[in-house]
Image (spheres, rainbow, N blue to C red):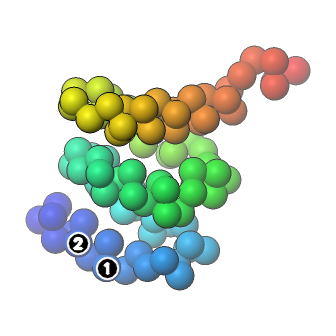
Amino acid sequence: MKESQEKYEELTCTKDARVDSQKWRNCLRLYVESEYMIKATEIVEMVGLNHLLSTDWFLIFEINFHGLLNVLSCNDIDLITKWKHYFLKVCELFAVDRLA
C-alpha cells in the first residue's frame, strides 16, 4: 500500500512542480519513512533544501532528523555526509545568536 502511494506521489511530482512544494514534501516524507534515502536525497537536491525550508521548516526539520538517523545506519559515506549537511543547515535556523 505504501509503495503504491509513493509511486503515485512520485509520478505526480514533476520537475515543473517546484512551485507546488506540498507534493515534494509528501514525496520526501514517504521516502524517508520507508528508508529509501537515495530517492529522498535526489528530491532534496532537485528541489533544493532552501526552497523546502522556506515552505515548512518544522516538517523539514523532522524529515531531516529522521533522514539523518536512517543514513547513519548505512555504510554510504556520501549519503551520511549529505544528510549531516542538510541537518546542520536546518539547525542553523535555531541558532541562539540569531534569535537575539
> Disc 1 versus disc 2: distance between alpha carbons?
6 Å
Looking at the rendered image, the quarter that the N terminus falls into is: bottom left
Query: In the image shown, does 83 or 21 lie closer to the viewer?
Result: 83
Residue receiving disc 2: 7
Residue at disc 1, secondary structure: helix
Q: Is residue 25 above or below residue 4?
A: above
**x%, y% of residue 6?**
24, 66
Query: In the image shown, does 6 or 43 lie closer to the viewer?
Result: 43
Residue at the image position 39 percent from the left and 58 percent from the top: 42
Label 1 with label 2: CB-CB less than 8 Å: yes
Q: Amino acid at mark 2?
A: Lys
Q: Is residue 20 above or below residue 40?
A: below
Q: Tell me where residue 66 sits by quadrant.
A: top left
Residue at disc 2, secondary structure: helix
Q: Is residue 65 visible?
A: no
Q: Which mark is residue 11?
A: 1
Residue at the image position 36 percent from the left and 62 percent from the top: 27
Total numbered badges shown on the rendered structure: 2
Disc 1 crowd, CA 10 A, few/some/many (<14, 14-19, 20+): few
Q: Is residue 66 left or right of residue 97?
A: left
Q: Residue furthest right?
A: 100
Residue at the image position 36 percent from the left and 37 percent from the top: 78
**x%, y% of residue 94?**
68, 26
Q: Amino acid at mark 1?
A: Leu
Q: Residue furthest top?
A: 96
Disc 2 crowd, CA 10 A, few/some/many (<14, 14-19, 20+): few
Q: Is residue 57 left or right of residue 8?
A: right
Q: Is residue 49 left or right of residue 95?
A: left
